[in-house]
Amino acid sequence: MANEDDFCKLEISVDEFDSNLLPEETRSSGAANREAAIETFFQDQLRSIATEYSVTIEGGIVRVTWRKSSVRPDALDQAITALKQGDYGSGVQILEFLVPSRGNDAMVHYNLGMAYSDLGKLDQAIDHLSRALKIDESLVNAKVAVGVAYARKNDPERSASILKEA
């Protein structure tokens, strides 16, 4: 029997969706088939991690619901695999879509923070790495990564302070 904890949902505006994940001809906001391409992207991602899912787009809002599957790979594992293969677009998008349903999962925030750091999005990296640390203070790698992100932001004093704590 399905557990209510297995039910996940995500809402994101069409404008917030990372267009780089779409075929080039559908990336512009005026593209006639943009919404269909976004829907297809989510369906492709969910097909590998869920047995039941729904993707709808109404009024510029993408609504995605799915039920976790005990027989399919976990979405976090899928995201980590994508990141390891250098597919940051897919990996980050999967992680972002996990945040609403797994916001208290330190590893979701840690991996999202590390990906953003690799992409040079340092403020977002620091935010997610800090969230991971609030959830699990024992994540020494997250603390080191926060220190490194501050160093990359040219804030050596803050970086040194954080790295000393690690």
Image (tube, rainbow, N blue to C red):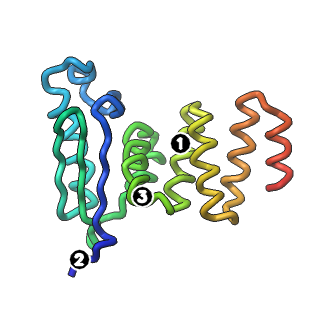
**Residue 48 found in image quarter:** bottom left
**Residue 137 found in image quarter:** bottom right
x, y percentage for residue 157?
85, 36
Circle 1 SS class: helix
Please tell me the numbered disc located at residue 76. 3
Q: CA distance from mark 1 to mark 2?
A: 32 Å
Report the side of 83 relative to 157 (left or right).
left
Q: Residues within 10 Å of mark 2 (few under 14, many from 20)?
A: few
Q: Image point 43% across, 60% down: which residue? A: 102
Of mark 3 and mark 2, the one earlier in the sequence is: 2
Please tell me the numbered disc located at residue 115. 1
Q: Amino acid at mark 3?
A: Leu
Please state which of residues 51 and 105 is positioned toward the viewer in this rendering.
105
Q: Quadrant of the C terminus?
A: bottom right
Q: CA distance from mark 3 to mark 2?
A: 20 Å
Q: Image point 27% across, 49% down: which residue? A: 45
Report the side of 20 relative to 134 (left or right).
left
Q: Which residue has dot 2 on it?
A: 2
Mark 1 vs mark 2: in front: 2
Give the residue at the far front of this rendering: 59
Q: Image point 18% across, 32% down: which residue? A: 35
